[in-house]
Amino acid sequence: MVCDPCGVAAVPVYLEVGSKRVFACARDWPGWCRAGKGETDALAALAAYAPRYAAVAAGAGVAFPTGVPTLEVVERVPGSAATDFGAPGAVLPSDAAPPRPDEGERLASLVEAAWRVFEGVAAGAPAELRKGPRGGGRDRDKIVEHVVDAEVAYARKLGVRGPRPKPGDPTAVGAMREQILARLRAGGPPPERGWPARYAARRIAWHVLDHAWEIEDRARPG
């Protein structure tokens, strides 16, 4: 069981404000981050996804707020082209401080749980997904391949280098992910032009969960 260090009723949220899109991200919950056309839409989307994120927290053994969470906006940061394209790209000033050992363990546990959610969803989904605006036209196996490809790039941002694992090789994918988790647990300064651990955890978990939830949505009958 990983302890939750937050211990507060309200969930601290930061808003990444682009010119076309706003991301609302729970600062201390890697992967719980949703977007909208404006701040109100983004916060509503974040609240709506709380029950889905609760499964991630449960898988990590981290206590999660029950019921409808109270979201407290504690920071607004400017977005970028990445924000408007559809990815949360803001590194917070507070991300610079290396996480404490217990915090690093918590971050790693939540990222690992996000991967388990994704793998479970992908395993239970049909190969061909319903087409539509949600997530575009990739089918299940192409989404899995895309997630692995992205994580190769994310791993390099943490100083983890190696050959690209094949998406269908769970041993190779697992080995890369174990190295990512080790870097998140260790914390420490990021490599040159790399990502600090807190931001890396948020970005990696957001990406894998965004696609897990996409698969869930597109696997359901229209």
Image: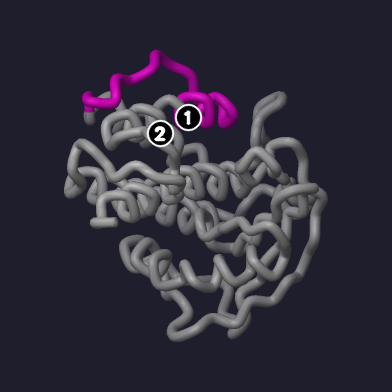
Question: From what the image shows, is residue 46 above or below residue 19?
Answer: below
| Residue range of the region highlighted in magenta in the rendering | 150-169
- In the rendered structure, the answer to whether residue 177 lies left or right of residue 197 reads left
- In the rendered structure, the answer to whether residue 20 lies left or right of residue 101 reads right
Graded by Cα atoms within 10 Å as few (under 14), some (14 to 19) or many (20 or more), the crowding at tag 2 reads some
Q: Main secondary structure of the magenta part?
A: loop
Res 147 label = 2
Q: Residue at x 18, y 43 (%)?
A: 126
Q: Which residue is drawn at 42% across and 50% down?
A: 209
Q: Depth check: give the residue in front, 34 or 152.
A: 34
Are circles 2 and 1 on residues that touch, CB within 8 Å? yes
Q: Depth check: give the residue in front, 155 or 33.
A: 33
Question: From what the image shows, is residue 191 above or below residue 163?
Answer: below
Can you tell which quarter of the image residue 86 is in?
A: top right
Can you tell which quarter of the image residue 61 is in?
A: bottom left
Res 12 label = none
Amino acid type for the residue under numbered disc 1: Ala
Q: Is 204 part of what is drawn in magenta?
A: no
Label 1 belongs to which residue? 150
State the image coordinates of residue 216 (x, y, percent, origin top left).
31, 54
The quadrant the C terminus occupies is: bottom left
